[in-house]
Amino acid sequence: MRPRAGDLLRIDGRASVQFAGERALTVRVVAVCPRPTYAGWVWLTGYVLDRRGQAVARREVFVQLAGLRRAAGGPAGGTGRATARRR
């Protein structure tokens, strides 16, 4: 899987051992670094989401592409933003 900005991903121990178990993250991707890294790895920038889907921290993570999974709870490529109504 090749992530893109807007993707909602579950990053766990399959993507990197540092995110195994309770350290797993749900991340809304905002950028994918275009610079080459080790084969099969990529730097992602995104917002960590809490259980309510609210952004709680901006993170940069180095992960294996083969271990990335789409997170349940939202369409891939969505913005995750709430829109305010104009009066």
Image (spheres, rainbow, N blue to C red):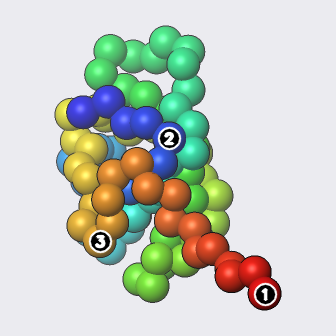
Q: CA distance from mark 2 to mark 1?
A: 31 Å
N-terminal label among 1 and 3 = 3
**Amino acid on which disc 3 is placed:** Gly
Q: Nearer the viewer, residue 44 or 81?
A: 81
Determine which residue is flagged by label 2: 5
x then y, percent, for residue 53: 46, 77
N-terminal label among 2 and 1 = 2
* Mark closer to the observer (1, 3): 1
**Amino acid on which disc 1 is placed:** Arg
Q: CA distance from mark 1 to mark 3?
A: 30 Å
Secondary structure, mark 1, is loop
**Residue at the image point whose x is 37% and y is 26% from the top:** 41
Report how many numbered discs are placed on residues in the image.
3
Residue, far right: 87
Task: For the residues labelled 2 and 1, say whether their Cβ atoms are less than 8 Å apart.
Answer: no
Image position of 4 (left or right of 39): right
Determine which residue is flagged by label 1: 87
x then y, percent, for residue 52: 45, 85
**Amino acid on which disc 2 is placed:** Ala
Determine which residue is flagged by label 3: 73
